[in-house]
Image: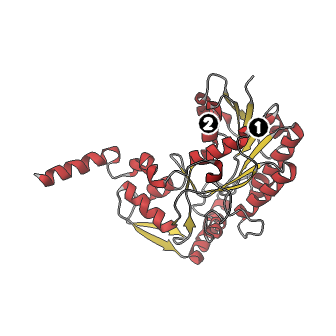
Amino acid sequence: MSKLVTIYGGSGFVGRYIARRMAKQGWRVRVAVRRPNEAIFVKPYGVVGQVEPILCNIRDDASVAAAMAGADAVINCVGILAEAGKNKFDTVQAEGAERVARLAAAEGVSRLVQLSAIGANAESDSEYARTKALGEAGVLKHMPDAMILRPSIVFGAEDGFFNRFAGMARFGPVLPVVGADTLFQPVYVDDVAQAAVQGATGKAAGGVYELGGPDVSTFRELMGQMLGVIRRRRLVLNIPFCAASIMGFVFDMIHTVSFGLIPAQITRDQVRNLRNDNVVSEGAKGLADLGIKATALEAVLPDYLWRFRPSGQYDAIKESAVKMRAQE
């Protein structure tokens, strides 16, 4: 019988790419998610019955243990960018990660991959970064040979970064950003998936790997590149951190008093994160150590941001027509 991998958060942005790659390698894939009825799109990644979404609550021991029963490898992709309801940074990213590792060790799982983030720091004033670091420590406590992946900002067709700002660029002449001079090293989602698969299949050794793309750019430069792809001219306006912190406080309050019905556009914790550069540390192991060639941003962005152009898929045709008229 083929081997089995359990992917917690396997229907998320990164998780679905990992699930697809594991299925292509012949593994049976168990996608453990909160809402399996919303994750049925993962089933066609393999043959009938090869990829199955199941119900799992990362905050519950019995639920996590049931999801990994009989698994040969475990990959944890669960993470949150903002707290909502019972899903707090501590319970999901710190306690949840340690729970997966503790139960995996008890189950006798041979390999575990933990998806963390560049900037994970137990001393950080950001709850996101602090709990990512605590999650890593909890994983290594129970499974010292685990693979820890720390990607920079991840881009791809379903990302919540370039898609979000490209959508914002359709309205008004100004594109506001927080931390315009903060450095990022965007990494392609499928490159991250390749790294995770190598760890799960035993083709790569455990340890901490920081994953970044071939280029380092400021937030402002990334927005300029995105605007070039969608062929829109906008003023990229930097919002000072002090003003952004106030905005984050207001949005947090609105989110709280609305009982979570109104999502915060930016939180105070996200502002704290944006104060720090998000790039691979000097001397850290990365994609090159795994034999993976990093995919450049310009090779992928046009493939999924074309829909934000003024005329969408017909924009190139209109440009061609204009050039032809000019030559007449």
Quadrant location of the N terminus?
Answer: top right
Tell me the residue at 60%/45% (across/down).
Answer: 13
- The residue sitting at 61% across, 23% down in the picture is 47
Report the residue that reaches farthest toward the right. Answer: 106
- Give residue 84's position: percent from left, percent from top: 69, 54
Q: Secondary structure at mark 1?
A: strand
Tell me if residue 157 comes above or below residue 253 in the rendering. Answer: above
Question: What secondary structure is found at the residue carrying circle 2?
Answer: helix
> Is 245 left, or right, of 136 in this rendering?
left
Label 1 amino acid? Answer: Ala
Q: Residues within 10 Å of mark 2 (few under 14, many from 20)?
A: many
Say which amino acid is labelled 2: Arg
The residue that label 1 is drawn on is 73
Along the viewing direction, whichever of 275 and 57 lies nearer the viewer:
275
Colouring mode (rainbow / by chain / secondary structure / one colour) = secondary structure
Q: Which residue is mark 2?
A: 21
| x then y, percent, for residue 128 | 70, 61
